[in-house]
């Protein structure tokens, strides 16, 4: 996410969060305004965890090791949409949503120089085997990344915490989960929190025509996930005004018409589920 981006202002009374307006991210950091972010930790089949090293030009904790990837949740976004975006932007990866699991939500206050970051953080774990050499780093954010064993991670956050951004409470909760395989395996994949929705075949055909996967990978990830809450709004957030202004009025109207049909089918699906 760029330095000047709109994010939601939230109260700090998690889990009873309430959006109280929007604000520029830089102003929120200057004044310690509570907002939301997402952290995703990637693990693989070798019991390793992926660490990201922040680049030297970052204003907030430069040159330190951090979460596999993370970012602010934009105004009106969900943490899922933000996770999809940040994974692609920071590391050049597409998330396998079946393996993305919610861990916990954490309140965190961090200060560095003149920045006061007060965040409600949705924390996820992603089990995905990635080749380090295939990662594409966002040069403004990431210097490098590396796989380390769980045991090495536990040792580093205990004996060499100064080399990390101090997500102390998050580290402790993560360690508890990674050392308990039963608890880790019992975590529910994100998309099981919502009912599975499958559009009608005619709508699927329209979606494939207006949102081909090669041009709209993030949108297709959402459409294939089965997640229905805020689906059309999340898609509209991807279709930024900047992008819509680069295509013809007819193409814009066609895409918005598809979203109207999608919204209509989702509402019908929810109504049918309630009546079952």
Image: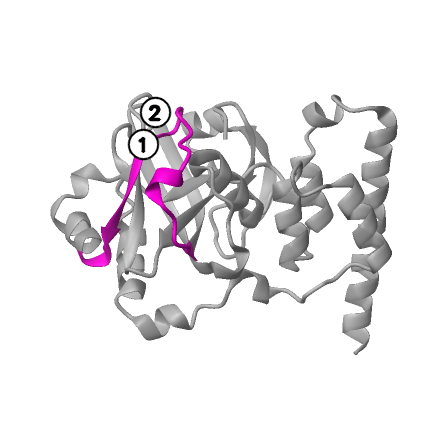
Give the residue number, with chain letter if any, for mark 2.
Answer: 58
Which residue occupies 33% across, 61% down? Answer: 45
Quarter of the figure that contains the C terminus: bottom right
- The residues bearing labels 1 and 2 have C-alpha atoms spaced at a distance of 7 Å
Tell me residue 13's x, y (percent): 48, 51
The stretch of residues the image draws in magenta is 125-151
Q: Which mark is residue 145?
A: none
Whether the residues at callouts 1 and 2 have beta carbons within 8 Å, the answer is: yes
Residue found farthest to the left: 159
Which residue occupies 53% across, 61% down? Answer: 98
Q: In the figure, residue 53 lies in which quadrant?
A: top left
Tell me residue 55's x, y (percent): 31, 27
Tell me residue 21's x, y (percent): 61, 36
| Other-residue count near label 1 (Cα within 10 Å), few / some / many at <14 / 14–19 / ≥20 | many
| Other-residue count near label 2 (Cα within 10 Å), few / some / many at <14 / 14–19 / ≥20 | few
Q: In the figure, residue 90 lies in which quadrant?
A: top left
Asked whether residue 148 is drawn in magenta, I would say yes
Number of disc labels: 2
Nearest the viewer among 237 and 115 is 237
Label 1: element kind? strand
Instruction: Kindly tell me whether residue 208 is visible in this rendering.
Output: yes
Asked whether residue 50 is drawn in magenta, I would say no
Left or right: 247 with respect to 193? right
Q: In the figure, residue 241 lies in which quadrant?
A: top right
Give the residue number, with chain letter if any, for mark 1.
Answer: 54
Please determine whether, in this image, residue 100 is positioned above or below residue 195: above
Which residue occupies 65% across, 39% down? Answer: 214
Label 2: element kind? loop
């Amino acid at each position: 996410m760029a330095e000047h981006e709109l994010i939601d202002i939230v109260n700090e009374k998690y889990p009873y969060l309430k959006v109280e307006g929007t604000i520029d991210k830089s102003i929120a950091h200057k004044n310690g305004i509570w907002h939301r972010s997402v952290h995703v930790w990637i693990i693989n089949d070798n019991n390793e965890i992926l660490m990201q090293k922040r680049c030297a030009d970052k204003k907030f904790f430069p040159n330190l090791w951090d979460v596999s990837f993370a970012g602010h949740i934009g105004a009106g976004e969900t943490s899922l949409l933000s996770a999809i975006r940040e994974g692609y932007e920071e590391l050049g990866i597409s998330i396998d949503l079946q393996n993305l699991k919610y861990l916990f939500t954490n309140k965190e206050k961090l200060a560095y120089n003149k920045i006061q970051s007060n965040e409600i953080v949705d924390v996820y774990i992603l089990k995905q085997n990635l080749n380090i050499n295939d990662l594409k780093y966002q040069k403004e954010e990431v210097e490098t990344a590396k796989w380390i064993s769980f045991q090495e991670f536990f040792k580093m956050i205990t004996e060499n915490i100064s080399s990390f951004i101090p997500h102390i409470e998050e580290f402790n909760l993560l360690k508890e989960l990674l050392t308990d395989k039963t608890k880790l395996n019992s975590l529910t994949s994100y998309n099981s929190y919502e009912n599975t929705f499958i559009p009608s075949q005619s709508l699927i055909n329209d979606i494939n025509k207006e949102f081909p996967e090669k041009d709209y990978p993030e949108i297709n990830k959402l459409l294939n996930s089965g997640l229905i809450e805020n689906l059309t709004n999340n898609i509209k957030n991807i279709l930024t005004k900047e992008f819509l202004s680069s295509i013809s009025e007819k193409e814009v109207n066609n895409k918005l018409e598809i979203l109207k049909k999608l919204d209509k089918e989702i509402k019908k699906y929810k109504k049918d589920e309630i009546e079952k």
